Amino acid sequence: MEQLHLSYLKLLEELSSSLDRLAQLAQEKAAAVRADDLIALDEVLKQEQAMTLNLRGLELKRLKLVGQLGLDKVPLDELEGRCPPELADRARNTVDALRSSYTTYRSCADMARALLELNLHQIEKVIAASGVDPAVSGSGYEAPDVEPPKQMKTDFRA
């Protein structure tokens, strides 16, 4: 059972590292937005997608370990008391580090999102100032509604 607890704590530490990496990516995303660097932004978004897949894998492992340990409905606050006494300190430190990583990630992600939203609003204002209503014209990805030339039409009744 102690080995399962160790595996769970290692998983939580890995999750904390992943959140730290996501926070770093959020900062890189904000820097790319500030620099108007769409290529750098695209690269960061690709890395975020890869991290998201990694987090999904960690979540599956976590669910499996939580089930094996019987900690299904146990909040992280109570993890220290549910671990063997020799792992209690490590559990407390791991939970504290995970909380800190999550707080940092949320802060960085919120800042990057606000910056992206601000820039999108500015783009919409520029488009509206040029005489185009973005709400009416759509995203610009629709196919044009144009008739093909006469020589390209076929009479299917013939």
Image (tube, rainbow, N blue to C red):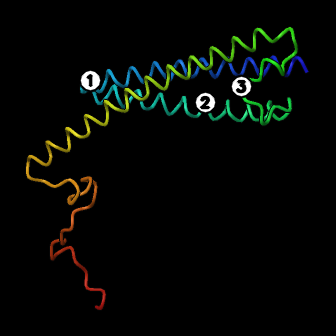
**Left or right for 38, reference 145:** right
Question: SS at mark 2?
Answer: helix
**Left or right for 123, reference 156:** left
- Which residue is under mark 3? 76
| Residue 39 x %, y % | 31, 29
The residue most toward the left is: 130
- Which residue is under mark 2? 54
Q: Amino acid at mark 3?
A: Leu
| Residue 34 x %, y % | 26, 23
Determine the image quadrant of residue 41.
top left
Q: Residue at x 20, y 53 (%)?
A: 134
Whichever of labels 2 and 3 marks the residue nearer the N terminus, that label is 2
**Left or right for 111, reference 120:** right
Of tags 2 and 1, the one toward the viewer is 1
Instruction: Kindly check if marks 1 and 3 are in contact, taking CB atoms under 8 A apart as contact.
Output: no
Q: Amino acid at mark 2?
A: Asn
Q: CA distance from mark 2 to mark 1?
A: 28 Å
| Residue 35 x %, y % | 25, 22
Whichever of labels 2 and 1 marks the residue nearer the N terminus, that label is 1
Q: Residue at x 27, y 26 (%)?
A: 37
- Which residue is under mark 1? 34
| Residue 27 x %, y % | 39, 20
